[in-house]
Amino acid sequence: MRALVAARAKDPVAPPQAEGPWPLSEPFRVGSVEIPNRVVLAPLAGIGNRPFREQARRHGAGLVVSEMVAAHGIRHGNQRTRSMLELGAGESPVAIQVFGGDPAVMAEAARVVQDAGADIVDINMGCPVPKIMKTGAGAALLADPSKGEAVVRAMVEAVDIPVSVKMRRGIRPGDMDPAETARRFEAAGASLITIHPRAAADEYSGTADHSISASVVAAVDVPVLLSGDIADAAGARDAMAMTGAAGVMIGRAALGNPWALGAIARGEAEPRPGAHQVLDEHIAFCEDIAALMGPDRACHYLRKFHSWYLAGRGIDDADIQALMEDPTFDEAVARLLSLRERARIAGT
Ligand SMILES: Cc1cc2nc3c(=O)[nH]c(=O)nc-3n(C[C@H](O)[C@H](O)[C@H](O)COP(=O)(O)O)c2cc1C
């Protein structure tokens, strides 16, 4: 598969036009950091921990972003929050995303993130959850872009690593010009902008309108990533062609399907791993998660992953349902091992 990608002459990271290598497989730079390809794992709260990110890198994501981490939690040395900053040897380049509304607290968090070994520190300006927005964090930073700007500036002054911004199009559709806002964040020192072109009030409804992303790409010189409803290489090609962006960020399409990341990075069609291969991957993931958080929390965390991995892979719904109801980690793994044995015998 080859893309015809609209490039902007002024954009030094724009992928090549017309024929040539699949543009998403090419490296690009975020400040001083080289990213080996243009497919990025999205930040996913409650999901994007170290094993999840390492798996994404192994499968071909060029950059992975952590789930959002509370700047206040970092400041207070909250144990659970600090453990979210532990990085693995296999995940670089990695961005840690922080959320908060106070420039000084965010600057302090950025220093801790840098000391933790992150390559990039990302600012959450998209979270639509009222509890978060009420504190002035997440998408609330877009309500008054001068607040977002102050946060970017404080963080850029505090660290040597690049600072990036992940933003929505606004709080409500049409309430701000995301291109103008992105330009202000760039002027404040942001080295990368990710645009999820839904309004915060829309949460995840409707579809992401990447013509809005195109206006952001046109407005800034730093690389722009597209986030929203990109699930395969064909969708990535279309979104890149529409916008001339530097790359794509993949969230929900990677859940239980890390193969999608490599396929998009290589420009290949949706991969169809057999049930046996999927179970191998899922069992290894379960073990990594249990090593990280212990079997009880792992059991809870993994419940949704059972169906994300196994639905539509030729495995009986009743078996998937039983996995989601399993009370202990050991029982879930025993059931997965028996499903794998069945798949091996069936040759699926
Ligand atoms: C479960 C879930 C958790 C998310 N957590 C975060 C987060 O911590 N930080 C963030 O910036 N965006 C977060 N998002 C938004 C995603 O990063 C992404 O922008 C959005 O899902 C659209 O991309 P997609 O269609 O590829 O999933 C989250 C989305 C989902 C579904």
Image: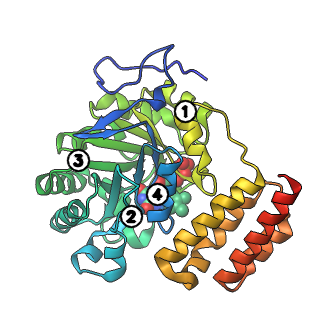
Q: Which residue is mark 1?
A: 266
Q: Please rate how many residues cluster around mark 2, counting C-alpha atoms within 10 Å: few if below 14, some from 14 to 19, many from 20.
A: many
Give the numbered dot on residue 53: 4
Q: The residue under label 4 is which amino acid type?
A: Arg
Q: The residue under label 1 is which amino acid type?
A: Arg
Give the numbered dot on residue 138: none
Residue at mark 1: C-beta within 8 A of ligand 1: no
Q: State the image coordinates of residue 161 (x, y, percent, origin top left).
A: 20, 50
Q: Please rate how many residues cluster around mark 1, counting C-alpha atoms within 10 Å: few if below 14, some from 14 to 19, many from 20.
A: many
> Which numbered disc, 3 or 4, marks the residue closer to the eye?
4
Q: Is residue 160 left or right of residue 303?
A: left
Q: Which residue is mark 2?
A: 68
Q: Please rate how many residues cluster around mark 4, counting C-alpha atoms within 10 Å: few if below 14, some from 14 to 19, many from 20.
A: many
Q: Which residue is mark 3?
A: 162
Q: The residue under label 2 is which amino acid type?
A: Met
Question: Depth check: 105 or 55 in front?
Answer: 55
Q: CA distance from mark 1 to mark 4?
A: 19 Å
Q: CA distance from mark 1 to mark 2?
A: 28 Å
**Quadrant location of the N terminus in the rendered image:** top right
Can you say whether 215 is above or below 196 in the image?
Answer: above
Mark 3 / mark 2, whichever is N-terminal: 2
Q: Give the number of callouts.
A: 4
Mark 3 / mark 1, whichever is N-terminal: 3
Q: CA distance from mark 3 to mark 2?
A: 17 Å
Farthest residue to the left: give it: 157
Residue at mark 2: C-beta within 8 A of ligand 1: yes
Q: CA distance from mark 3 to mark 4?
A: 19 Å
